[in-house]
Image: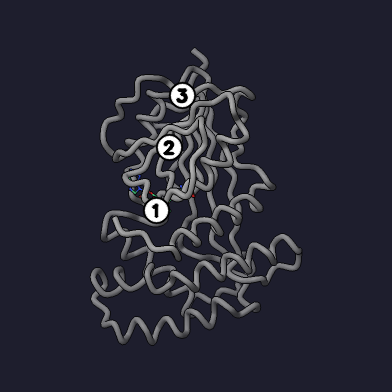
Amino acid sequence: MEVCSSRAGHESLQHQLFHVTLGGKLYLSPTTETPQAVLDIATGDASWVLDYANQHPSASVIANDTSHAQLKTAAPNIVLDVGDANENWTYSCQFDFIHCRQHHRRIEERKLFEQGLMFLKPGGWMEMQELCNPVTSDDGTLDEYSPLAKWGRLITEASAQLNRPVDNPTHYASWMRKAGFTNIETVVYKFPTNPWPNDEKGKLKGLWNLYNVIQRLDEFTTVLFTKVLGWSRGDVDAFLVDVRKQLQDKNTHAYWPVWVLCLQSFLG
Ligand SMILES: C[S@@+](CC[C@H](N)C(=O)[O-])C[C@H]1O[C@@H](n2cnc3c(N)ncnc32)[C@H](O)[C@@H]1O
């Protein structure tokens, strides 16, 4: 798999964005202070797993990904696992904590929750952290006929046609209940489109998010719009000029919802 440095940079910035959004925490689940076995699914550049492993020296942390080409460095308590998380898991232990952040709809979530429950120790926790489309606003400043709102609707529509719907996090809690989890906590945060919020933390998050989105807007959009929706490359380019303009407009108080769900297996 080809990995470019801009993607690795994107993931590091995204990691900072999550960190600030979660109030400096790597996760919200009230796990044991001294976990022994932890699994991170779709590790990516390992920003999260490195911080977690360093903060929890008691834990042996399995970092799963289909490729570890993006990995910058490792830690003594990280075990690299190359594998497709959609396949049946063959881990030889059960986990105190299973974490999955931003798998970008590459993993079939219903199966992920079922396997997660099977591989958690009694009372262990699983946590999902995922950004959700479409982009939205609370105060009506994202006009439904505006380019950004249209972009959000079309991305959602095209991803559904590809069977990788970008609004899946809204269904997670019900799928988790179906998988057999009973104790589920949900928190929804916001990634602002630009530094429109009044507070300093919101401004910082908006600035980082804008940088990330502008860098990768073309990549997110082009395949879905041309291959799935049948747009021409020229039409996509022209449309994205208006989307970029609105992304930077501080009068549009838009944001992406970010879903964090913590789920606990039965205590036995
Ligand atoms: C956006 S990156 C992950 C970011 C990382 N979890 C974080 O939050 O910093 C998505 C990762 O999912 C991995 N991935 C995609 N499909 C996968 C699969 N079926 N099983 C495991 N990992 C997968 C990709 O290789 C990529 O590294």
Q: Nearer the viewer, residue 178 or 217?
A: 217
Callout in the foreground (2, 3): 2
Callout 3: 10 Å neighbours few (<14), some, many (20+)? many
Q: Earlier in the sequence, mark 1 or mark 3?
A: 3
Q: Residue at x 72, y 60 (%)?
A: 201
The quadrant of the image that shows the N terminus is bottom left
Q: CA distance from mark 2 to mark 1?
A: 17 Å
Q: Is mark 1 within 8 Å of ligand 1?
A: yes
Between 133 and 6, the one nearer to me in the picture:
6
Residue under label 2 = 63
Is label 2 in contact with label 1 (beta carbons under 8 Å)? no
Q: At which x and y percent is residue 213?
A: 50, 69
Q: In the rendered structure, which amino acid carries the disc numbered 3?
A: Phe
SS for tag 2? strand
Amino acid type, callout 2 = Ala
In terms of depth relative to the viewer, which is nearer, 40 or 45? 45
**Counting residues from the N terminus, which is met first, the one under dot 2 or under dot 1?**
2
Residue positioned most to the top: 268
Dot 3 corresponds to which residue?
A: 95
Which of labels 2 and 1 is toward the front? Answer: 2
Q: Secondary structure at mark 1?
A: loop
Q: Which residue is mark 1?
A: 104
Q: Quadrant of residue 50?
A: top right
Residue at image point 26% right, 59% down = 162
Q: Is residue 230 left or right of residue 43?
A: left
- Looking at the image, can residue 102 be seen? no
> Between disc 2 and disc 3, whose residue precedes?
2
Q: At which x and y percent is residue 87?
A: 26, 36
Label 3: element kind: strand
